[in-house]
Amino acid sequence: MQAEIIAIGDELLIGQTIDTNSAFIAAQLNLQGIKVWQKKVVADTTEAIRTALDEVHPDTRYVFMTGGLGPTKDDITKKTLLDYFGGEMVFKDEVFEHIRNLFRGFNREPKEVHRQQAYVPSTCEAIVNETGTAPGMRFERAGRYYFSTPGVPYETEHLVGDKIVPWIVNTQMEGRLYHKTLITQGIGESDLAEMLTEWEEELPAELKLAYLPSPGLVRLRLTGQAETKEKSKALVEEGIAIMRSKLGDLIFGEDVSSLEEIVGKSLLARKMTLATAESCTGGYIGHLITSIPGSSEYYLGGVVSYSNALKQDMLGVKAESLEAHGAVSEQVALEMAEGLRKRTGADFALATTGIAGPGGGSVEKPVGLVWIAVAGPRGSRAKSYHFGNHRQRNIRRSALMALDRLRKEVQKIEI
């Protein structure tokens, strides 16, 4: 099955807003084995939207449109879709009732402009949007389905992830395709390929392995397509078991799981707590951890200790350690983690110190050098890494490596 994505909005074309919706939609479709043929970004004009719809590939079954829906007068997508698919605007009581309840939660009453959100083309099926006022819409023409969602990312994520994709799976998918994705950290794509080469060369025709790298992570997607869905699943599960035996703890999760989620679950299962001391990562690790609902159950907090003075005052790093070894060193990383663990009473403390770049490096300590330390019930350990000279990539890779180091230490503790 094939899909296309049409992202609508002038703000996307001028670089004012980054299109994260298309990435989310593509990822959700990928999990179901639906291939995205192409993605287009078009202006919020009738002509641009109609042209994009006219140019959809003949083999495409699902078209996802995101953006251009809202209470303001310059949102013309709904009017364009009415003209394109025909029909008339009809009022949906269930949509307006949701809008009214949403405003009551804010102790307000919806205005006429919000009431207009409850009008949709009669040729579509309205999809109530629990996270906003603009509903999603589903159109059908000649066996092809068109879905329209608002441009607000969390609204699109709700509608696509919780409503549209489940609808496709439950009503449309009787195919033979099955796939599963393993997520690895701390190893590059080429090294993974080398570890799996012999096994990969012997894969049956019904199995395909794809490498999907990103900064700090590599996803390995194994897809099966046999005579039946059951056989496809059996082949994939057998292959996944072999990959796990070959890659061991390089694998931290499956499908859409994240390191921060896995770490959180591991800490919760052991009723243990965490604190973070960050220098070069600037609080990014704390951000990742607290992006997981319920993280307050195990995350005590963190210190962003950029300066040497703060490392000493807040974490107890010794002045002589800074003088003898410098801030970016094994000794200082260990003292950051140990000092924070002692002062907070956390079961685990995680520390990072390094040179994110692009400046500040030297021959002895080049840009991209990062020391990561973990202090826990089994003692304290620190290790250095070299991540290159791209600042944002260094921060991301440092944070992921730190979380992976923590994951391995936590999982050594018996439940």
Image: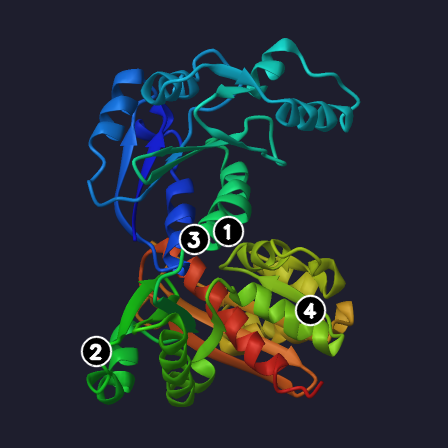
- Of mark 4 and mark 3, the one earlier in the sequence is 3
Secondary structure under the numbered disc 1 in the rendered image: helix
Between marks 2 and 4, how big is the CA–CA gap?
46 Å
The label nearer to you, 4 versus 3, is 3
Question: Residue beneath label 1, please?
Answer: 166
Q: Which residue sits at x=34%, y=21%? A: 44
Image quadrant holding the C terminus, namely bottom right
The label nearer to you, 1 versus 3, is 1
Question: Residue beneath label 2, please?
Answer: 205
What amino acid is labelled 3 in the image? Gln
Question: Residue beneath label 3, please?
Answer: 28
Between marks 1 and 3, how big is the CA–CA gap?
10 Å
Question: Residue beneath label 4, please?
Answer: 274
Task: State the image quarter where residue 43 is shown.
Answer: top left
- Of mark 1 and mark 2, the one earlier in the sequence is 1
Nearer to us in this view, 107 or 296? 107
- Of mark 3 and mark 2, the one earlier in the sequence is 3
Q: Which residue sits at x=67%, y=55%? A: 293
Q: Where 271 falls versus 48 (above or below)?
A: below
Task: State the image quarter where residue 186 is shown.
Answer: bottom left
The label nearer to you, 3 versus 2, is 2
Q: Where 119 falls versus 342 (above or below)?
A: above
Side of 210 where 298 appears, left or right: right
